[in-house]
Image (cartoon, grey):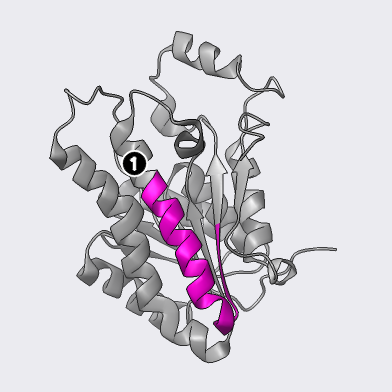
């Protein structure tokens, strides 16, 4: 069985780099059209477009802040005009994720987390539902995290927002199920990408020692889980979390 997304259009928010770029590449290689969404770094987005095109993926570069209503409307409107109606959404865009004690946090950091992991999924999903409901087919995939299930500390702002994202996703899975729209979550562990290049080696070694499979996961591992959930083969799967972390939270 080979997964096939031919004729589908997918938005992966924040997919000019990191996990998002690999998720978009994987969906595109299955036949989906994928815009490259970026907020600030246009040169990086241009490189991603080149990589997508080299893989034979139909794409377009679209700058949009997915935490604002106007930005989301622009992203979806431009995608519809350039690539077609949106069938699949992967909510991947993220912000800085500082580890701080409660005394060190301020509300601005908490708010930024909520903007990316609750407000953005709400805005994007609401904007694309018209077409999905009309065709009685759609896929909403939230990139959550093991941090909520493992209660990682000191990381309360990120953990709280990811917990809210999980609750929102589960509720939406019930609301949208009658329309043939599935809502699922992929919860990666610590997957080293560009943003982790300067992380202390001691911290990396400590985390690696906790993984039962004894090796790091890759962005492709996360992308493959998204491909399954985006496919027709996952039509009866909704409200679920796939942990991609080598067994680091097998009780999830």
Query: Most extreme residue toward the top, as rendered?
Result: 202
Question: Residue at position x 57%, y 61% from top?
Answer: 239
214 relative to 81, above or below: above
Q: Which residue is mark 1?
A: 160
Residue 60 location in percent, x, y? 42, 67
**Which image quarter is the N terminus in?**
bottom right
Q: How many marks?
A: 1
Question: Residue at position x 59%, y 18% from top?
Answer: 208
Residue 236 location in percent, x, y? 70, 70
From the viewer's perspective, is 127 left or right of 12? left
Q: Main secondary structure of the magenta part?
A: helix
Decide if residue 9 is in sight here. yes
Residue 148 sits in which quadrant? top left
Question: Residue at position x 71%, y 72% from top?
Answer: 232
Query: Most extreme residue toward the bottom, as rendered?
Result: 134
Residue 133 location in percent, x, y? 50, 86
Residue 88 location in percent, x, y? 53, 70
> Magenta part of the protein: which range?
163-184
Q: Is residue 30 magenta?
A: no
Question: Residue at position x 41%, y 77% from top?
Answer: 128
Near-viewer residue (88 or 58): 88
Indicate the secondary structure of the residue bearing disc 1. helix
Near-viewer residue (171 or 211): 171
Q: Is residue 172 magenta?
A: yes
Q: Residues within 10 Å of mark 1 (few under 14, many from 20)?
A: some
**Which image quarter is the C terminus in?**
top right
Decide if residue 42 is in sight here. no
């Amino acid at each position: 069985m080979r997964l096939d997304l031919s004729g589908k259009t997918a938005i992966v928010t924040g997919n000019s780099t990191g996990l998002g770029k690999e998720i978009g590449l994987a969906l595109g290689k299955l036949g989906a059209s994928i815009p490259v969404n970026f907020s600030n770094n246009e040169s990086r987005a241009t490189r991603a477009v080149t990589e997508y095109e080299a893989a034979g993926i139909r794409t377009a570069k679209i700058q949009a802040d997915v935490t604002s209503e106007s930005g989301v409307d622009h992203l979806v409107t431009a995608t519809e005009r350039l690539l077609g109606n949106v069938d699949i959404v992967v909510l991947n865009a993220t912000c800085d994720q500082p580890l701080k004690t409660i005394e060190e946090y301020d509300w601005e950091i908490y708010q930024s987390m909520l903007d990316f992991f609750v407000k953005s999924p709400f805005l994007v999903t609401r904007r694309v539902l018209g077409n999905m409901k009309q065709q009685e087919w759609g896929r909403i995939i939230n990139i959550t995290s093991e941090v909520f299930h493992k209660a990682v500390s000191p990381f309360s702002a990120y953990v709280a927002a990811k917990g809210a994202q999980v609750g929102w996703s589960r509720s939406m899975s019930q609301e949208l199920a009658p329309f043939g729209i599935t809502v699922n979550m992929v919860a990666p562990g610590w997957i080293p990408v560009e943003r982790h290049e300067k992380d202390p080696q001691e911290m990396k070694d400590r985390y690696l020692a906790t993984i039962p499979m004894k090796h790091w996961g890759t962005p492709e591992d996360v992308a493959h889980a998204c491909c399954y959930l985006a496919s027709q083969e996952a039509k009866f799967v909704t409200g679920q979390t796939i942990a991609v972390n080598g067994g680091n939270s097998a009780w999830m």
